[in-house]
Every structure is written in C-alpha cells, then in structure tokens.
Image (cartoon, grey):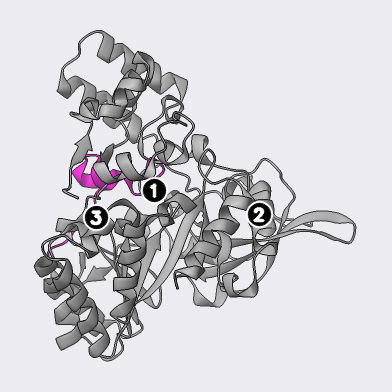
Amino acid sequence: MEYKAYVTQNFKTIPQIKQLSDEQVQAIEIVSSVLPFKTNNYVVDELIDWSKVPDDPMFIGTFPQKEMLIPEHYKKMEALFKNGAGKSEIKKEADKIRLQLNPNPAGQMEHNVPVLQAEKLYGMQHKYRETALFFPSQGQTCHAYCTFCFRWPQFAGMTALKFASKEAGLLLQYLDEHPEVTDVLFTGGDPLVVKTEILASYIEPLLESGPPSLRTIRIGSKALSYWPYRFLTDNDADDLLRLFEKVKRAGKHLAFMANFNHPVELEGDTVKKAISRILETGAVIRTQSPLLRHINDSSEVWAEMWKRQVSLNCIPYYVFVARNTGAQHYFSVPLVETWQIFRQAYQSVSGICRTVRGPSMSCLPGKVQILGVTEVGGTKVMTLRMIQGRNPDWVARPFFAEYDEKATWYTDLKPAFGEEKFFFQDELESMLEPEEVEVVYE
C-alpha cells in the first residue's frame, strides 16, 4: 500500500468523509485547530468501520470529536471560524487554550529534563533511575495522531513545549556520566517515522561506544497499529529489521514498546506479518494502552486484546489511566471504574496474559498503580502502590486513599485514616520547587 497522510488541510478529500454531516466535518476542523490531527489511508481504510461511525472506536481514536473541547473553548474557536478569522488569529487563540490543557503533565518539562555540564538537555527526560528517554528530532511526528495522546504538544507547533534533539553525542556523554541508567527509550512522536539510516545514527553509537551499564534499548512506537508496512514494504523496511538484529548481536535487549488500543488493530494479516518479522530479529514486543472512555472502556475488549496479543507472541505490559492533559475530560474513566474493568478482564484470561500491570497513573511522583478497593477496620478505602517512583525506595510500597468513586486522577484523592499527607509527599516537595509541586490532597 502506498502511504497517504491526511491532516486538517486535506482531510475532506477522504472519500468516506462524505457520509458525515456538515456539523461533524466542522467539528473536526475546529477541534483540530487546537488539538493536532493526522491520519492515513491504512487507518481510514483498514481500521475504521465506517458503518459504525461516529461511534466506531478507531474513528474516535483518530478523528477529533466536538466534545474533546469544553463548550467554552469550542464556542471561542467556532466564532473565529464563522467570522473568517485568519490563520494567525486562530493560532493565537488556540495557543491560549492549549496552555490551559496542562501540556507536558507530571513535571515533564520542569522536573524530568536532565542536566549535563550545567546545561538542560531538552531532547531527553530522566525521571526514573534506570531509564532515560531520548526524543530524536526527526521522529517528533507520527503516522497518525491519537486523539487522546498525552504528548500532543509535540505536534502543536509550540516550540517551547516540544522535546527534540539531534545530539546523539550528548546522549552518549550523559550515559557515561550516569551508569545507573540501564535502559534508553527512543520515543516521540514516533521514532519509526524516520528513515532507518537516521535512526541508526542514534542507535549504533550506543552499541559501539555506549557504556557497559547500558543493557536495554526500547523503541516506543505506534507503527504496528497505524502503519505496519513500515516493517514490510517501505523501501528501508529490511534495513530497519537488520538494525534490530544488530542491537541483539551487540548483546543488548531490544524491547519494542507497541501501543494497541483496541483488538481491531490486531486483526489484519498485515499487522500479523509485521509482528512476526520484528520477533524474528530477536526483539521482544511489549504492549500497552490507556483505558479510554468511548474506545476501550470494557473488560471484554481488554480481555480479547490481551488474548490476541499473546497469540501473536506479544507480552501485555501496561494498562494506563488516561493522562490529565488535553481532552482528559472526554476520555477519562473514574479510577474505581477503571480498576473494576481491569479486574474483570484480568479474571477472564489465563495466567499467561497476566503479565500486564495496571491500572497505572504516570504522574508527578511516579507510576501509581490502583491495586483495588477494600475495607480496613470497617472503612472503605482505595489501595495503591508505586510501580515506579522518583525515589526508587517508594516502589512497591502500598498506601491508602479515601474511597472516591468520582476521582479520575491521584490529585483528586485524599489520604485515608485521617492522615494529612501521602507517605511520599514531604520528600517529593523537597525534590521540587515548592511553587511547582502538584497538590496531592485537599
């Protein structure tokens, strides 16, 4: 299949768009002026069931919906379009709205950017001791944009909010000075939108000159779902697979971090062949997704997705809570309900699928997992723990919050049993500038 991208400027050329109402088309145009929109012919022709639009989950996952903007914001943008405002005026108002949508949540820009020789490296993040993230500048786009993406600022045209770097040398230098880092995650955007020779220019130096402490290279990508031809018929697909093999021959573990949000993404022969080719290189594919209203908020959907992944020799890895950014109000599911969906799905699969962890919130202190709802001394509480933490000593330590069936994020929760703070709060405050610390309790 020849690749064809659709963005806001040309999405009306998609043949299936003719079946949408004028109001639906207008909503796509208005919302995409604030939250980035991009799709392609594979998603449109192979993944979306147009007989179920506008309720089809893959349509909602890639085409902006009117309700993704709160009414106040939608009305402001709608008025600009109706009044024939110019591009600069529309962008100016869109940027104002974007800054109200919590871009780069969980301290990504303020607290995760590492420092090398007194200089901040804005193409990297280092939040957890063993893992560093690298954002190759050429990979800060995607084959298609997820409407729920928590990294939407990477594509919004606001340079000050973007992570990107062309400096592979600085990455090597940073790793040399930080032997605690064992894993490097190439992320974005999607690092697999770039040509293989460019990706190799970042990865091969790690294999040739990287410190011995580096054990794992991770690649975070949506390409298996949105453009599996990247591994099959793209003109450098074979070169990409040879690069994967080179990582393995160098004695490093290659973890392909695949994002699948719905079972339909695993149905076609194309994605199955792509998965098989990746696995033949010695890479391991781990799968992850947020749990999202309107897309996959069903235990049956999750159970089916895990079963299909395991049947294709992928490893279910993470279920995330929808991030507190962008259109969270549209996609979020209350924490208690999220856990109930996860639990029901977990109960209905065999142990081989239960490698999955979650539901997990990637928030300021770390990855906070909802372990469940229980009673302690006659008091109904929520049990949580950290899968990852800014301080590794926080990991796997259980803690309790008051039961709250409406809470959608950890900052909505209050400590249980009359405690004033969660156990990590004082140390977290000492790590961060006081005026920039999120409020964890009220």
Residues in magenta?
145-166
Confirm whether the magenta stretch covers residue 157.
Answer: yes
| Badge 1 amino acid | Phe
Classify mark 1: helix, strand or loop: loop
Which of these two is toward me, 328 or 418? Answer: 328
Could you say where residue 162 lies in the image, as x and y percent from the top left?
24, 50
Residue 236 sits in quarter: bottom left
The disc label shown at residue 49, or none? none
Taking the view exactly as shown, the residue that stands out farthest to the top is 83
Whether residue 286 appears in this view of the structure is yes
Residue type of the residue flagged with mark 3: Phe
Q: Is residue 49 magenta?
A: no
What residue is at 41 percent from the left and 52 percent from the top? Answer: 265
Q: Earlier in the sequence, mark 3 or mark 1?
A: 1
Nearer the camera: disc 3 or disc 1: 1
At x 25% / y 80%, what residue is drawn? 175
| Residue picked out by circle 2 | 339
Mark 2 or 3 closer to N-term?
3
Question: Going from the N terminus, do you reach mark 2 or mark 1 first?
Answer: 1
The percent position of residue 202, horizontal first and vertical second, equals 15, 72
Mark 2, other Cα within 10 Å: few <14 / some 14–19 / many ≥20: many
Magenta-colored segment: predominant secondary structure: loop
Closer-to-camera residue (53/121):
53
Q: Position of residue 259 (x, y in %)?
A: 40, 58
- Residue density around tag 1, few if under 14, some if 14–19, many if 20 or more, within 10 Å: some
Q: CA distance from mark 3 to mark 1?
A: 13 Å
- Image location (x, y in percent) of residue 232: 22, 63
Residue named by callout 1: 150
Q: Is residue 65 depicted above or below 367 in this figure?
A: above
- CB under 8 Å between callouts 3 and 1? no
